[in-house]
């Protein structure tokens, strides 16, 4: 008698079963993609905040090395600005670019070779308008581009010629700046509320209580060139927020509607009377 054998049948998927599996996979992808996108966006925002804090820390090193005098604004007419100054103290080339705004937008040109930034674009200065240390001439194109700006009241205007104050873009006169600017980095009663560096559509900005709030969160400077507060009021990281570092060294995400509550200069009202909320 021969031993019995058990026949094993191979069973293929039916068309219906295959379609069900594909549908389940498609559903899972649809569920996971938004979560992955949110995770990537959160990571980019975290890197941006780290950049803003790193810029502030580099500035702190410079302050300590210069008896706590702030960066000069075009001293004796030489346009140094903060980027070329902080490169001398180790600012990294990638630390001045937000991951959400790495490239300039040619549609944002407002002068030849000069572009303002926006929610998803960096600003670019004309290379002839920015002092470039000799050792950086070869990388001038990198030096004149960035995604962050400095609080203009954090410059030292002591040695700045009156004619170099660009009042046409809403900056007060030299006399007015000397009265309210933070000439020294250690002369701030509440450093935790003094904004220093953050997401901005230009390399610097000097908000005024008479500014017009931004009406566009993508390219806020398109319609409000003379308004300095609008240069910060963009939706770069969602939820109407930007990343900002403060004079005490900490950094945080700030709602564009809360920017008017920060201590931009020494006489900025702290009683809540200033209301410069964005209108978009």
Image: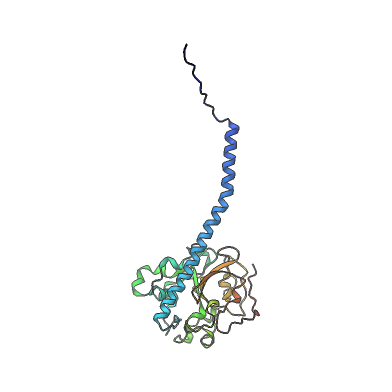
Q: Position of residue 241 (x, y in %)?
A: 58, 67
In the picture provided, is 72 more to the left or to the right than 37?
A: left
Q: Position of residue 214 (x, y in %)?
A: 61, 71
Q: Position of residue 219 (x, y in %)?
A: 57, 67
Name the residue rendered at 54%, 53% in the picture.
36
In the picture provided, is 79 more to the left or to the right than 270?
A: left
In the picture provided, is 271 more to the left or to the right than 242?
A: right
Along the line of sight, which residue is nearer the eye, 191 or 254?
Answer: 191
Image height check: is 113 above or below 159? Answer: above
Name the residue rendered at 59%, 40% in the picture.
23
Name the residue rendered at 52%, 81% in the picture.
153
Image height check: is 207 above or below 253? Answer: below
Along the line of sight, which residue is nearer the eye, 43 or 118?
Answer: 43
Along the line of sight, which residue is nearer the eye, 44 or 10?
Answer: 10
Along the line of sight, which residue is nearer the eye, 120 or 161?
Answer: 120
In the picture provided, is 210 more to the left or to the right than 164?
A: right
Q: Position of residue 207 (x, y in %)?
A: 57, 78
Res. 134 in view: yes
Q: How many marks?
A: 0
Task: Identify the image quadrant of the C terminus.
Answer: bottom right
Res. 200 in view: no
């Amino acid at each position: 008698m021969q031993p019995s054998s058990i026949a094993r049948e191979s069973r293929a998927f039916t068309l219906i079963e295959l379609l069900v599996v594909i549908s389940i996979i498609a559903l899972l992808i649809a569920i996971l993609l938004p979560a992955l996108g949110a995770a990537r966006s959160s990571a980019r925002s975290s890197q941006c905040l780290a950049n803003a804090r790193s810029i502030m820390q580099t500035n702190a090193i410079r302050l300590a090395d210069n008896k706590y005098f702030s960066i000069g604004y075009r001293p004796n007419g030489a346009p140094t600005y903060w980027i070329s100054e902080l490169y001398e103290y180790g600012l990294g080339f990638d630390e001045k670019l937000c991951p959400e705004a790495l490239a300039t937008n040619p549609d944002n040109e407002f002068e030849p070779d000069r572009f303002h930034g926006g929610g998803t674009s960096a600003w670019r200065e004309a290379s002839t308008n920015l002092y470039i240390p000799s050792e950086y001439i070869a990388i001038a194109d990198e030096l004149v581009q960035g995604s962050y700006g400095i609080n203009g009241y954090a410059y030292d205007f002591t040695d700045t010629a009156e004619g170099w104050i660009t009042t046409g873009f809403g900056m007060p006169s030299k006399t007015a700046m000397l009265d309210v600017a933070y000439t020294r980095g250690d002369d701030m009663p509440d450093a935790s509320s003094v904004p220093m560096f953050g997401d901005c559509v230009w390399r610097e900005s000097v908000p005024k209580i008479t500014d017009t709030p931004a009406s566009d969160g993508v390219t806020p400077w398109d319609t409000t060139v003379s308004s300095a507060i609008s240069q910060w009021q963009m939706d770069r990281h969602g939820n109407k927020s930007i990343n900002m570092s403060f004079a005490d060294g900490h950094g945080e995400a700030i709602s564009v509607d809360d920017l008017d509550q920060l201590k931009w200069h020494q006489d900025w009202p702290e009683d809540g009377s200033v209301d410069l909320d964005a209108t978009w």
